Each structure stands twice: as C-alpha cells, then as structure tokens.
Image: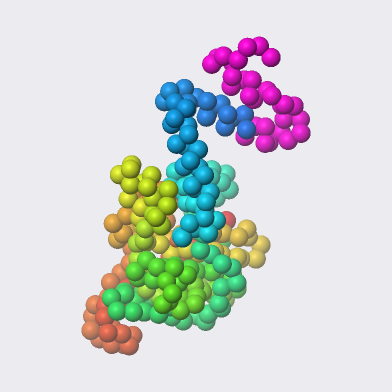
C-alpha cells in the first residue's frame, strides 16, 4: 500500500479486503458509503473536534431514553428523509402505476389488531373531537373489488395521541381490523386524527431545534391491507386541512391526501345521534 494521502485514502479503505468476494452487496453499499462520507468530510473540511461531537451525537442516538426504549436511530433516519427515500425508491419500482401509493409502517403498529364489525366506532370520542364517518373500497388495478381483504387501521385520537402514549387512553383506542364485504367495501366511525409532534426530548429533538425545524407530523390514518393474491400493502392517508401537510417533519406526505366533508345540518346530526358537526370521507384503495 502506498503512503496514505488525501487523494488515495478513499480507494485504500474501499479496497482493503477481498473487494466483495465474501459479500458483494455489502461491499457495494460499503464502498459507496465510504466514498460519500469522505466526500462530505472534504466538502465541509470536518475537524477532529467536530467529528468527536458527531460521535457523541451517535452514541446518544443509540442510547435508550424516556420516549425510545431502543434509542432514536429510527427517528433520526425518518427526520433526515432517509426512510422516505427508501419508500420512494421501492414505490418507483413496484407501485405507483395506477395504485395507491405506499408509505412507511411507522413504529406504532403492533399486529393482531382487534377485529371490529362494519360500522363500528373504533375509539373513544371525547370533548372537542370531530366525529368522522369513513367509507373505503379496496380494489385491484383492473377495478375488481377485493372481498374479504383484511384492512388494519390505526391512528392517534383527535389530540394526536396513540393509545400507548397516554395512560388514560383505553387499550386499542383507534386501532382496528376489518374485513371488506362482498363488494370490497368497509365503513367505520372514528375521529379526525390530530397532528402530533415526534418526541423531541432527545438528540433528534435538539437537532431539529438548532436547525429551526418544527417536529410535527401532518395528521394521518395508517392502513395495512392484506388481500389474497396481492402483496401486503402499507400506506398512510393524509388530510389537506392539516397545517403541516406541506411540511411534515419526516417528509412522508405525497399525493395521498384527502378532503373531509363537514356536515353541520341539525337534522343530519340528530339522525346520527350526535351532538356536534360530523365529517365524512370516501376513498378507494387500489392495491398493487
Ligand atoms: Fe402515525
């Protein structure tokens, strides 16, 4: 190996080893990562002191804290747009061709959600929350309705809290599993979900603060659809009324945004047995 210089150190690191004989894909990823990291150091003229600050930051990211028992590495990859870039790459190859766009699962899906019946209310409606009547159809790319598809739905309440985040919320509040009927339809009652901030008590939060970034997610409902003969499909439905719909902190809002219709006619409200205006929305999922 020749004397190491600023001009040859990157190649020296990449070629140190069997150059991908043992694990070609790892070597491909590793080589590109080393190339980009060294280029980044050159570009900002990174000092040893700044590198040490970076190391300490990574240690903190990996350390459990009150909001993240596994540390915050996932949150950081979300806030850097890295998670969403992977979704966009996968969507470009597999989906998005006349199908509903996919999205990340997020950290609050727990599987085996409680089965509910068509029309059920899926959580507790409390003061100030906006009742929402949702209707969906699940169909394939040819417009064929998919009967008996399992549709998992999960969302925060109107204040933006998932049930696991507040001790006073009932178990499985606004988490539900439905099956589509013979016409690929399902309908249920919920509330308009609240916008919520990602937890910002840790190192990711301090980074956002020092960059002048807000930590809010635009309000959304999560879905996971299992239809026989189709790949499992995960997505998030966003709402145009959210003030954060154009500045979501994990960059996950794309074209899947819906409008809700407000109903404030007294007779209509009474007919629903409600004491306040309610909202409706109807959306057809086209699964890949
Ligand atoms: Fe969410």
Towards the viewer: 265 or 75: 75
- Answer above or below: position of 27 versus 88: above
The stretch of residues the image draws in magenta is 1-29
Which residue occupies 47% across, 63% down?
Answer: 222
Ligand 1 located in image quadrant: bottom left
* Residue 178: quarter of image: bottom right
Q: Answer above or below: position of 133 versus 283.
A: below
Q: Nearer the viewer, residue 167 or 157?
A: 167
Left or right: 112, with 185 as reference point: right
Q: Position of residue 160 (x, y in %)?
A: 37, 66
Residue 216 vs residue 129, the one in the foreground: 216
The answer to whether one can see residue 106 in this image is no
User: Where is residue 33, by image quadrant?
Assistant: top right
Q: Quadrant of the N terminus?
A: top right
Q: At 56% from the left edge and 26% from the top edge, which residue is drawn? A: 35
* Colour pattern of the rendering: rainbow
Q: Is residue 57 magenta?
A: no
Residue 162 x, y percent position in the rendering: 44, 68
On the question of residue 243 being in view, the answer is yes
- Residue 262 in percent (x, y) is at 28, 72
Identify the residue shown where x is 47% and y is 70%.
Answer: 164
């Amino acid at each position: 190996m020749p004397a190491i210089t600023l001009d040859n150190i990157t190649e020296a690191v990449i070629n140190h080893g069997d150059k991908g004989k043992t694990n070609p894909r790892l070597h491909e990823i590793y080589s590109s990562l080393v190339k980009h990291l060294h280029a980044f150091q050159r570009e900002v003229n990174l000092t040893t002191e700044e590198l040490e600050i970076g190391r300490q930051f990574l240690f903190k990211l990996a350390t459990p804290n009150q909001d993240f028992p596994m540390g915050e590495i996932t949150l950081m990859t979300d806030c850097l747009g890295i998670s969403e870039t992977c979704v966009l790459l996968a969507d470009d190859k597999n989906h998005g061709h006349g199908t509903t766009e996919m999205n990340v699962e997020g950290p609050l899906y727990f599987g085996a959600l409680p089965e509910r019946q068509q029309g059920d209310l899926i959580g507790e409606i409390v003061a100030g929350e906006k009742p929402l009547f949702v209707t969906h159809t699940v169909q394939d790319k040819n417009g064929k309705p998919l009967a008996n598809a399992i549709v998992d739905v999960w969302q925060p309440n109107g204040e933006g809290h998932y049930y696991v985040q507040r001790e006073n919320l009932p178990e499985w509040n606004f988490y539900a599993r439905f099956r589509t009927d013979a016409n690929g339809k399902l309908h249920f009652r919920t509330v308009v979900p609240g916008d919520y901030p990602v937890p910002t008590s840790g190192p990711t939060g301090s980074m956002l603060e020092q960059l002048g970034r807000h930590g809010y997610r635009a309000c959304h409902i999560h879905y996971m659809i299992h239809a026989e003969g189709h790949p499992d499909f995960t997505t998030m439905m966003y709402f145009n009324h959210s003030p954060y719909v154009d500045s979501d902190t994990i960059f996950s809002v794309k074209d899947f945004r819906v409008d809700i219709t407000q109903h404030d006619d007294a007779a209509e409200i009474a007919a629903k047995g409600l004491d306040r205006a309610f909202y409706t929305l109807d959306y057809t999922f086209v699964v890949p």
